[in-house]
């Protein structure tokens, strides 16, 4: 027996999810038979003096349309409680722990948690070439169905199927794309996603995140020390990885924590400059004093002078 979700999945196309989102936001540009009226949309742009459209670029890869279609599918499995886990350490927990294919789990989360998640952290395969990633997908449809579904020629179908059990960049991107699309959907309007990665796929990840989340919603990239030892297997011993940070809507971005403020600091010696505060010493636009004395907390006497220029300590001397 075929479920409703399975029937739905048989009918969707690579652009189905996008058109569905577009219809939610711009229903006035859709016809009775759910077709997007491009001419009406262009006319509306002209009427509102939006006549300058910037040239852009996008990242294309083998399997992109297939990945876009996967992003629009519905879950075809059933979530079953783990009675043993629920009677163990997780008995009193309010958390949810899912075991299964992560794309299918994300589809389930999309059903119940659309626009509700504040923070997502993912640590995907880095695709280092050390057997840490292979793209396993059965491509359950026949070649003819794939050709009709995506409008492909025979050679293009073979190219698509070539990423099976592959660790190519295209295979990795096909794996990541639908997962990031759904992750964006379940983020709240104030939500943030953190994605750990290394040099092997950093540039590709940045490109698809710009496409999915929007370049304007890029927050920053954290560089963190991932190892302290020195490697001799390459000309340069790299000891860092990255965490890319994107917001669902950077205008509504909300960090969950207590921000630093001057209220946290006091001024017990009544220094005329006020309480200590975070001020970049290498960007002192006001031309203020960059000579600082170090006071002995026991005697109250000043022993050293520090001169700081461009963020660097350049002088340390005893004071008479």
Image: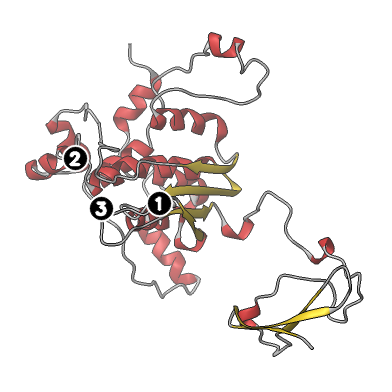
The label shown at residue 163 is: 2
| Secondary structure beneath label 1 | loop
- Say if 100 sits above or below 226 in the image: above
Q: Nearer the viewer, mark 1 or mark 2?
A: 1
Instruction: Tell me if residue 32 can be seen.
Output: no
The label shown at residue 151 is: none
- Left/right of residue 63 with respect to residue 292 in the rendered view: left
CA separation in Å, label 1 and label 2: 35 Å
Lower sequence index among marks 3 and 2 = 2
Q: Position of residue 123 (x, y in %)?
A: 44, 42
CA separation in Å, label 1 and label 3: 12 Å
Instruction: Report which residue position mark 3 lands on.
Output: 233
Out of 169 and 107, give the one closest to the viewer: 169
| Secondary structure beneath label 3 | loop
Task: Assess disc 1: are there few (<14), some (14-19) or many (≥20) residues with their C-alpha within 10 Å of its C-alpha.
Answer: few
Q: Residue drawn 7% across and 44% down?
A: 155
Instruction: Report which residue position mark 1 lands on.
Output: 229
- Say if 289 sits above or below 18 in the image: below
Give the quadrant of the N terminus. Answer: top left
Q: Position of residue 306 (x, y in %)?
A: 69, 81
Q: Position of residue 216 (x, y in %)?
A: 49, 63
Task: Assess disc 2: are there few (<14), some (14-19) or many (≥20) residues with their C-alpha within 10 Å of its C-alpha.
Answer: many
Lower sequence index among marks 1 and 2 = 2
């Amino acid at each position: 027996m075929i479920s409703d979700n399975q029937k739905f999945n048989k009918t969707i196309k690579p652009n189905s999810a996008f058109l569905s989102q577009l219809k939610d936001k711009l229903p006035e540009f859709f016809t009775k038979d759910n077709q997007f009226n491009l001419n009406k949309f262009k006319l509306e742009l002209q009427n509102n003096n939006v006549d300058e459209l910037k040239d852009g670029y996008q990242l294309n890869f083998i399997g992109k349309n297939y990945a876009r279609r996967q992003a629009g599918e519905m879950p075809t499995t059933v979530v079953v409680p783990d009675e043993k886990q629920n009677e163990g350490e997780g008995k009193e927990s309010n958390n949810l722990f899912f075991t299964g294919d992560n794309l299918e789990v994300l589809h389930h989360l999309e059903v119940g948690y659309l626009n509700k998640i504040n923070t997502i952290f993912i640590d995907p395969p880095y695709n280092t070439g050390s057997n840490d990633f292979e793209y396993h997908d059965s491509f359950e449809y026949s070649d003819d169905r794939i050709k009709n579904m995506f409008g492909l020629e025979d050679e293009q179908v073979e190219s698509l199927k070539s990423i099976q059990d592959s660790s190519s960049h295209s295979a990795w991107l096909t794996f990541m794309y639908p997962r990031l699309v759904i992750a964006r959907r379940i983020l709240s309007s104030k939500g943030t996603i953190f994605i750990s990665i290394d040099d092997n796929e950093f540039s590709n990840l940045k490109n698809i995140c710009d496409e999915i989340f929007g370049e304007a919603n890029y927050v920053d990239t954290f560089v963190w020390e991932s190892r302290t030892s020195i490697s001799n297997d390459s000309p340069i011993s790299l000891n860092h990885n990255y965490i890319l940070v994107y917001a669902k809507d950077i205008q509504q971005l909300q960090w969950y924590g207590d921000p630093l403020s001057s209220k946290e600091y006091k001024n017990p010696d009544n220094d005329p400059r006020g309480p200590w505060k975070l001020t970049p010493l290498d960007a002192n636009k006001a031309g203020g004093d960059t000579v600082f004395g170090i006071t002995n907390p026991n005697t109250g006497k000043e022993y050293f002078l520090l001169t700081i220029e461009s963020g660097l300590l350049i002088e340390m001397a005893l004071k008479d």
